[in-house]
């Protein structure tokens, strides 16, 4: 009959402190990775939402220009300017240029209200008059600055009439 010494037979009773600390470190690193991904997805979602707003604002101005084709060059707008408000209501007739200035005022005010970066949230409209066979061209540009960014974001829509 064999006798077993007590030294050679050891029984495992639970986990050691080192094992539990290693498990805690591994779980902590995983949780930090998940938190970083969550913050990145929040920022990407906010950026996408702002771009959608810029697309909608540019499309709105394109519709206003199409509705007032007679104004042509009156829709030219330099970045950073806010045209004076012109009151055009259903009771009074507005000249095409007055309606263009009213449209610009409403549009720039909407840009500044819905996009961040108060001094940099602006709209600009360039007009290329092409007499002859080619249609007239408008370039509508909207710029804004997102929180925590050093560079302006921009959306540009080109349309021909």
Image (tube, rainbow, N blue to C red):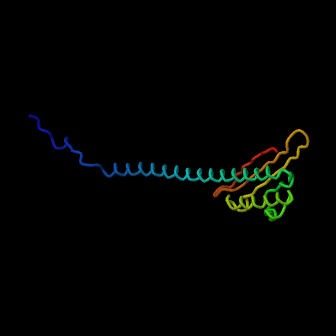
Look at 70% across and 56% down and name the residue there.
144
Could you say where residue 48 lies in the image, as x and y percent from the top left?
Answer: 62, 50
Look at 11% across and 38% down and name the residue there.
3
Look at 41% across and 48% down and name the residue there.
26
Q: Nearer the viewer, residue 61 or 18?
A: 61
Q: Nearer the viewer, residue 117 or 64?
A: 64
Could you say where residue 47 lies in the image, as x and y percent from the top left?
Answer: 63, 52
Q: Quadrant of the N terminus?
A: top left
The single residue placed furthest to the front in the displayed view is: 91
Q: Quadrant of the C terminus?
A: top right
Q: Nearer the viewer, residue 52 or 38?
A: 52
Q: Vertically, is 7 above or below 120?
A: above
Q: Is residue 98 left or right of residue 29?
A: right
Q: Nearer the viewer, residue 105 or 92?
A: 92
Q: Is residue 71 left or right of residue 141?
A: right
Quarter residue 104 falls in = bottom right
Could you say where residue 157 lies in the image, as x and y percent from the top left?
Answer: 75, 47
* Total count of labels: 0
Quarter residue 107 falls in = bottom right
The single residue placed furthest to the left in the displayed view is: 1
Q: Vertically, is 74 above or below 91?
A: above
């Amino acid at each position: 009959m064999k006798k077993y010494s007590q030294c050679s037979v050891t029984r495992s009773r639970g986990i050691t402190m080192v094992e539990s600390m290693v498990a805690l470190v591994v779980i902590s690193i995983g949780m930090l990775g998940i938190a970083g991904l969550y913050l990145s997805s929040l920022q990407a979602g906010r950026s996408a939402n702002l771009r959608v707003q810029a697309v909608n604002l540019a499309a709105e101005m394109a519709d206003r220009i199409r509705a007032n084709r007679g104004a042509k060059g009156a829709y030219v707008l330099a970045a950073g300017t806010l045209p004076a408000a012109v009151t055009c209501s259903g009771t009074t007739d507005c000249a095409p240029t007055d309606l263009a200035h009213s449209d610009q005022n409403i549009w720039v005010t909407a840009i500044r209200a819905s996009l961040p970066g108060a001094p940099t949230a602006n709209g600009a409209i360039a007009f290329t008059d092409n007499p002859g066979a080619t249609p007239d061209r408008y370039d509508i540009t909207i710029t804004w600055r997102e929180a925590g960014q050093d560079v302006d974001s921009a959306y540009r829509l080109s349309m021909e009439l």
